[in-house]
Amino acid sequence: MVSGTGPAPNQADTVAFWRGLWSEPINHSEGPWTEVVASQCASITPMDPVIITPDDVAEAVRGAPNWKSPGLDGLHHYWLKGFVVCHTVLARQFQEALNQKSLPSLFTTGITHLVPKDQDVCSDGVKCTPLIAAARHGREAAVRILLEKFRPPVRLETEGTVKFDEYVIEGATALWCAAGAGHLGIVKRLVRAKANVNHATKTLSTPLRAACFDGRLDIVKYLVRHGADVHKANKYNNTCLMIAAYKGHLDVVQFLLDSGARVDERALCGATALHFAAECGHGSVVCALIAHNAKILTNENGMTPLQCAAERARASVVEILAARPEVTRAQAIEAYELLGASFANDKEYYCLRMAYQYLHRAMTMRYDTRYGLLLKKPADPIPAYDNWRESTTIEEVERLHGNAHALHMEGLAVRERVLGRTCPDLPHPVVFRGAVFADEARFDRCLALWRHALQLRHHNKVSVVKDLLRFAQVFSQMIHIGIELPLSQVCFVLEACAEELKRGQMRIEKPQINHDPEALMSVALAVCAQEEYESNVRTALYLVAVAARLLDAAPATPATPATHDSPAAPATSATDAGEETSSAVRRAVFRLRHARLRTGQTLLHLAADRRTPVDDFHTSDVCQFPCMRTTRLLLECGLEVDAADDMRRTALHVALISFQLVPDEREQWSEALCGVVCELLARGAHVDAVDADGITPLLASIAGPAESLVRSALNPRLSCLAAAALALHGAKYRPSQVPRDLHAFLTMHGVTAMH
């Protein structure tokens, strides 16, 4: 069973075995030792009587796990922590047990929960057999014993889940693990034992690819000599040659080329090994690939290896490729321009000296009369770049020297012209330059650049999850330090956020189809799409909170009647513009009304929840929940006050329960809670709504600061009383016989439908 060769006992037999040990009552005979101990303690002064208080109970349950398996009463600690009204009853029961010097059976009888384990080694997301674990960690002696001593022999092709540098690898064999970890001796043992050298993981990665990734030429040579396929690619059609070129392992690249690896094979993104080597700046690998007649092709974005190198500021590779005979003079000039532009705005390789040098060199080449003039045709100026016009002469380029801002804007304009708006790499330097402006407190320039980057990504249907959060952070920073934030800026980002949530919902409902069933890519894409969607929902909440704050602070400007001395304001006045922006904000918030987390919580739930997480980078300075302003704006913009999550809890439920469950700083948040509760009740929130645990807002408010508010709103309508009566008697309804508009109402009051 340890080696994975024998059958594990089934669950029924295991349960029967342990039940025989634990379920039979046994009377223990303590023997005379208890009397001896009692006589020894007779002279000890008894301790003072202990008084157990509700505070003692609260302290005891505070550190207990929320959802650990309950005892005979079936009550989880989660509820004991939140409903402090129970602490008095528990304190009394403990005190009675202590005074009577005997414990009720409820305190002494436990439940054993059996969780059968499988035969694999499992921990921290890793699931593997002993052979895989030994191969992964280089335990050659253990591998030898497992291979030679066990009968029947261990299964060499058993797959497991392992971790390499925090990457989770599913479907890895012992040979894959040994090759990836660089254990040549174990690789040889496994291959001699007839392990399949081409057995791939779930993502179609082979042991040879694993060795190429780490640059282990010795293992690569051994595997190839024993039948490893150098052409076998992973799920992205990324070959062993590509990964070796990307990592810069020249000796491995040279061996694979000599072994017949196809030099111009394309990955699904259209890139070749030359692309990967060029963008990473591995000049020696680039030369080796060219020596084997590698072609300069374009990837799916229309970029050549020369452009990839220039975009990543890889000057040495640009020099190599620009000198190739198949590269035209115009292509070389644009590559040098792109290289200079990248140096001007690259976060990692920022260098204004190199930026000016290559921009000047490119312009000089344009005016080289020996080969004919190649005059530049600059694109139209872009407002986000200060309406900068590109230099078109050598004199104009020379005026850039020593002017940092001019070089920055020149670089951004050149990149957009050369790469085109559809290039996915175009926004990165734009965001970086905006971040520099933000650090200098030049927020108007920052917002202009970030808006442009957001538009570029939206245009290309690229995820903007980080961009949206970045806006929420800088908006909060501006408010916190007292810099005026135009509502129109927030409105623009709110509209973009609403659009992104719409697209995100479509990505969840219709994930990309993967034609490789073993790769599990459709599942991974769905999980990634869901995580991004939920992140955007929380960012939307931060943006709504910022908008609510600005709307709340905006002064109401009364209309001024027309007189002979002061004529009526025209339709395009500042007041009308402000009202138009305010209406646009509310329309954008209205578009967010259907956004929900996977738990079913709406933005209204999150705005009322004390536990709602807030990003710590500036956002937490402005956005704190529960928030009355945010709740009011959401309700004004059409969010349903009694919308329920998967636990059938409304926002009123969540506001009251979360306050009970977070004991810290309750006094500080009492006013905010009461404000949120007032907003919800004013919009008709039901105080008799029943969640999945049978709790109503009225019950959740007991002993809290909002109890009086909730009780004063307890004025149930006849329909509520009728629904409560049905629930009390366990009545169920047929959905086909009840109007659809009443289904949610009945569910909210605890009446279930017949299946």
Image (spheres, rainbow, N blue to C red):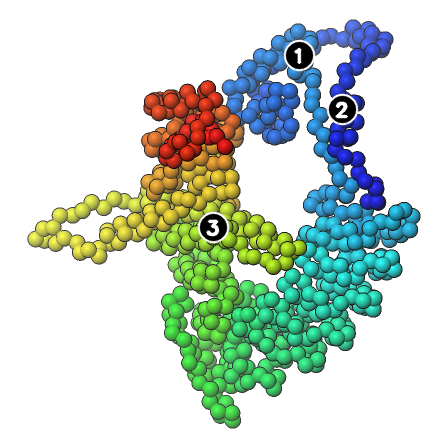
Residue 411 appears in the figure: no
In the depicted structure, whether residue 574 falls above or below residue 115: below
* Residue 19: image tag: 2
When asked about the image quadrant of residue 227, the answer is: bottom right
When asked about the image quadrant of residue 735, the answer is: top left
For marks 1 and 3 on the same chain, the one whose residue lies earlier in the sequence = 1
| Mark 1 to mark 2 CA distance (whole Å) | 23 Å
**Residue name at image x 61 percent, y 86 percent:** 325
Instruction: Determine the secondary structure under disc 1.
Output: loop
Return the residue found at the far bottom.
Answer: 370
* Residue 505: image tag: 3
In the depicted structure, whether residue 624 falls above or below residue 200: above
Residue 236: give x, y in percent of width and height: 63, 63
Residue under pointer 1: 104
| Mark 2 to mark 3 CA distance (whole Å) | 48 Å
Residue 431 appears in the figure: yes
* Residue 488: image tag: none
Instruction: Determine the secondary structure under disc 3.
Output: helix
Q: Amino acid at mark 3?
A: Gln
